[in-house]
Image (cartoon, rainbow, N blue to C red):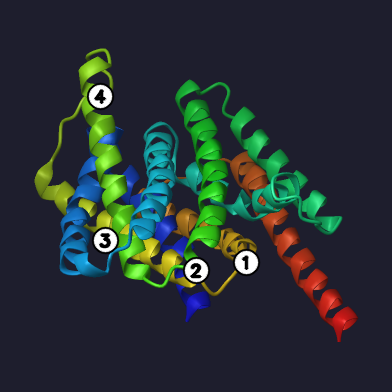
Amino acid sequence: MARILIFLNPVLAGSYYVASKAIIARYNPFLFTTIDSGIVAPVCLLILIMRARGIERQQLLKGICLGALLAINILSNIVAVFYTTATDAGFYPAMIGALAVVFSAIVLKERIPPGSYLAAALSIVGSCALIVSNLSDQSRFTGNIIAFLSNAEYVIYIFMMDRLSTDNKDTINLWAVQILTVAAISAVSYILFEAFAPSGVWPTHPNWRADVPVFLYVGVFTTLVPTLGATFAQKYVSALFTSFFYLLEPIWTIILAWVFLAEKASILTYVFGLLIVAGSATQYYVEVAHRKSHEETTA
């Protein structure tokens, strides 16, 4: 069950880039995220009110910490989508697996197989090449850098989830607090932006009849459901295992962007994107081989 939920996350996340790209040109990205998270926040607030007696202070603190990291990721992702294409943005989650290995080695001081360095190098080279290939298009170049940083930050979220959710008995409370934290940070960010940003930056001209269904889809199926799935599943699977499944995200994004947005990326975009995917695929096989070797040694 846990692996099925983790498998669904990149599928739903891949649709996020396409659904949001369809209408983001009409919105301030901070307003977009405020509406997106605000739609589902009342559900989470109601859940917490109904379960108020069972909420522990530790659960609140963990949920707020994870929610803050998730908010940074969601806000930076939507800004990236505003500037670049859904196809470009969809490639970067594939590097999460390789970056998770680097994070494990450098920050957590864990021993990793030599092949992992090759995997990380492929993903990082592919990411940098994809960014540099858009130097002539300032908007797309900016969006790709933000997408890269957003997914690097998401690696931290995955590992924090791994650390904070394994001993947490109440998944529902932790999940609901995260979503409410995202909604609160998004709203505050939008208010601050409107108060201090120069006029004319990210003007808003919505088409509510067409946009409300998109907000409902994004809020429920790319924010609410994946967060619940990740919160539950990472009690039972490792952070590295979770990271590898984001290999699937570019595939779904490319297909959906082609079908719904008629996006056609250049050959170079696909080549550099495949380097990112190859890096995480290499890391997956390195991890499998390492586990088999470890099992044979300890048998």
The one nearer the camera, 173 or 33, is 173
Residue 88 image point, x, y percent: 51, 42
Check the picture and name the quadrant holding the C terminus. bottom right
The one nearer the camera, 108 or 30, is 108
Residue 244 image point, x, y percent: 62, 62
State the CA–CA distance, disc 3 to disc 1. 25 Å
State the CA–CA distance, disc 4 to disc 3. 26 Å
The quadrant where residue 227 appears: bottom left
| Marks 2 and 3 close (CB-CB < 8 Å) | no
> Callout 1, which amino acid?
Phe
Q: Earlier in the sequence, mark 1 or mark 2?
A: 2
> Callout 4, which amino acid?
Leu
| Marks 4 and 3 close (CB-CB < 8 Å) | no
Query: Vertically, is 175 above or below 71?
Result: below
Foreground mark, 1 or 2, reads: 2
State the CA–CA distance, disc 2 to disc 4. 36 Å
Q: Which residue is mark 2?
A: 167
Q: Earlier in the sequence, mark 2 or mark 3?
A: 2
Q: Earlier in the sequence, mark 1 or mark 4?
A: 4
| Marks 2 and 4 close (CB-CB < 8 Å) | no
| Marks 1 and 4 close (CB-CB < 8 Å) | no
Q: Which residue is painted at 54% across and 36% down in the image?
A: 149
> Callout 2, which amino acid?
Asp
SS for callout 1: helix
Q: Which residue is mark 4?
A: 192
The answer to whether residue 24 is left or right of residue 62 is left
**View extreme (right): residue:** 297
Q: Which residue is mark 1?
A: 241
Q: Which residue is painted at 31% across and 46% down in the image?
A: 182
